[in-house]
Amino acid sequence: REKSPDSATEIFTDYQDNLWAISSGLNIFRKPYGNSEWQLVSEANDKQLCYPKAALNDTLSIAYIYSQSCDNSNTISVHQINLVAGS
């Protein structure tokens, strides 16, 4: 057991068993397989996206992050993360 980074509510693994965590704001963290520390991959400056959810493709190489505006539940955003190292 451990705390999720930045109170992340969405955690998933990629095709290489790396852990990924997504928190509101939209902040993205990665913990490489075998490591014990989370790395901040991307941090939103405006902190306007909340309630993130992730969906991965069949090969676990692409994650689609769905989030909704923190101040307007009728506005959503979709982001794509290429989980293949070096891409």
Image (cartoon, rainbow, N blue to C red):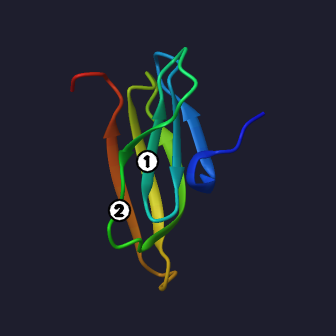
Q: Considering the image in quadrants, where does the N terminus appear?
A: top right
- The quadrant in which residue 2 appears is top right
**Residue placed furthest toward the right:** 1
Q: Amino acid at mark 2?
A: Ala
Of residues 62 and 26, the one drawn nearer to the viewer in this rendering = 26
Q: Secondary structure at mark 2?
A: loop
The residue under label 2 is 44
Identify whether 20 is placed above or below 68. Answer: above
Mark 2 to mark 1: distance in Å? 9 Å
Q: Earlier in the sequence, mark 2 or mark 1?
A: 1
**Residue bearing the label numbered 1:** 28
Query: Which residue is depicted at the point 37% across and 58% down?
Result: 78
**Residue 36: image location, x then y, percent:** 58, 24
Seen in the image, is 54 located left or right of residue 83? Answer: right
Residue 64, given in percent of the width and then of the height, sits at 41, 46
Q: Is residue 11 left or right of residue 48?
A: right
Task: Give the image location of residue 4, x and y in percent.
Answer: 64, 45
Whether 33 is drawn above or below 42: the answer is above
Identify the residue at the far left of this view: 87
Query: In the displayed structure, would residue 7 be above or below residue 71?
Result: above
Where in the figure is residue 30, as x and y percent of width and height?
46, 34
The local secondary structure at tag 1 comes to: strand
At a point 57% along the width and 54% down the height, the residue shown is: 6
